[in-house]
Amino acid sequence: MRKIKIITDSCSDMTAELLEKYDIDYAKMYVVRDGKETEASLTWEAYTPAEYYGMMREGEKLTTTQVPANEFDRIFRKYLSEGYDVIYISISSRQSGSVNTGTVVAKEVLKDYPDAKISCINSLNGSIGIGMLAIYASKLVKAGKSFEEIVDEVTAQRKCVNQFMTVYSLESFKRTGRVENSEAYQANLMAVKPILIADANGAQVPVKKIRGRAASLKEIVDMAAAAGADEAVQDDCVYLVHADADPEEIEELKKWIAEAIPHKQLVIVPFGPIIGISVGADAVGLWCFGKEITYKAGETK
């Protein structure tokens, strides 16, 4: 029987510790700065998060690439040649075309490995929401589930990943094309903070406007609690992700989370290089398993 390897991509915002703990690898995207491409490493070889988000605050223009076809070819062949089948869990197809590229490359690679399997799963999520599904898949591997069982179970859990994020401005989302229905949220965003979720189709959608930074941070905690984060059985953690936010804000958030979601371990990670360009400096989000997401942008909530 072939082994199973779980991989994701640079949008998963997993730390080196999480990647090692759950034996997960990832396909690399690239950050473009002054015309030069740098590998979007989740282990932050090129910059620290503070340096990276400092550049953004100073007005540096950074752009991103999706996973190149040759990177998919490299990572798929690496693990297939070592006797693994591969399950790739991608960023939402509403935010990147990487899952489509991966699917095309997988078909070509499998011609050379006719006994192997590759599945490319559209996570319908971004950031650590992808990582949560990869961790869930890794646990299923360890539990001895079959390739098909893992694909089915991960696919079934996609809409139970809940995201509640607040940003300083939607300008980064507008520039990278990763937010929808933002017209009503363009005025006075320095005072009114949008709360964004990943909807049932995997689109980034602003669903609330909250006046003031502190109130918006408290709101994402309350929304996570209301989504059933404390009762979710898929994971014993909730994930706080931030783009070099004020340490005092993070400490306050930790207290609120401990009060509202007391039975879950809190894991704090930085927004990675790719997602960070979309959300901008000082963005903060909570991710958790919880109630199934049914809301779709453009429909009555």
Image (cartoon, rainbow, N blue to C red):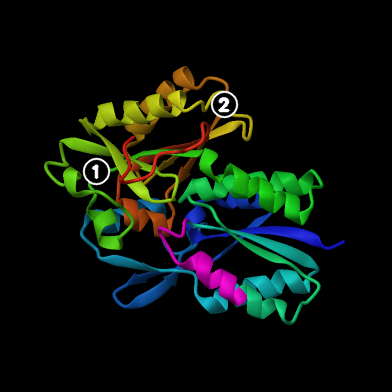
Q: Which residue is mark 1?
A: 168
Is 284 situated left or right of 213 in this image?
right
The answer to which of 289 and 273 lies nearer the viewer is 289
Mark 1: which secondary structure? loop
Question: For residue 119, which quarter of the picture?
Answer: bottom right
Q: Tell me which residue sits at (47%, 56%) in the image.
A: 92
Q: Was residue 94 drawn as part of the magenta stretch in this picture?
A: yes
Q: Tell me which residue sits at (72%, 69%) in the image.
A: 79
Give the class, few, some or many, for how many residues have Cα within 10 Å of label 2's Cα (few <14, many ≥20).
some
Q: On screen, 266 above or below 28?
A: above
Residue 68 percent location from the top left of the image: 50, 75
Is 213 situated left or right of 119 in this image?
left
Asked if the residues shown at circle 2 and circle 1 are in contact, with their CB atoms under 8 angstroms apart, the answer is: no
Residue 42 percent location from the top left of the image: 51, 57
Q: Please, what is the three-letter code of the amino acid marked with disc 1? A: Tyr
Q: Which residues are magenta?
A: 92-105
Which of disc 1 and disc 2 is earlier in sequence? Answer: 1
Residue situated furthest left in the rendering:
188
Distance from disc 2 to disc 1, alpha carbons, whole Å, reads: 27 Å
Q: Tell me which residue sits at (38%, 44%) in the image.
A: 296
Question: For residue 191, which quarter of the picture?
Answer: top left
Residue 238 percent location from the top left of the image: 52, 33
Q: Which residue is mark 2?
A: 264
Q: On screen, 244 above or below 28?
A: above
- Residue 176 visible in this rendered orientation of the protein: yes
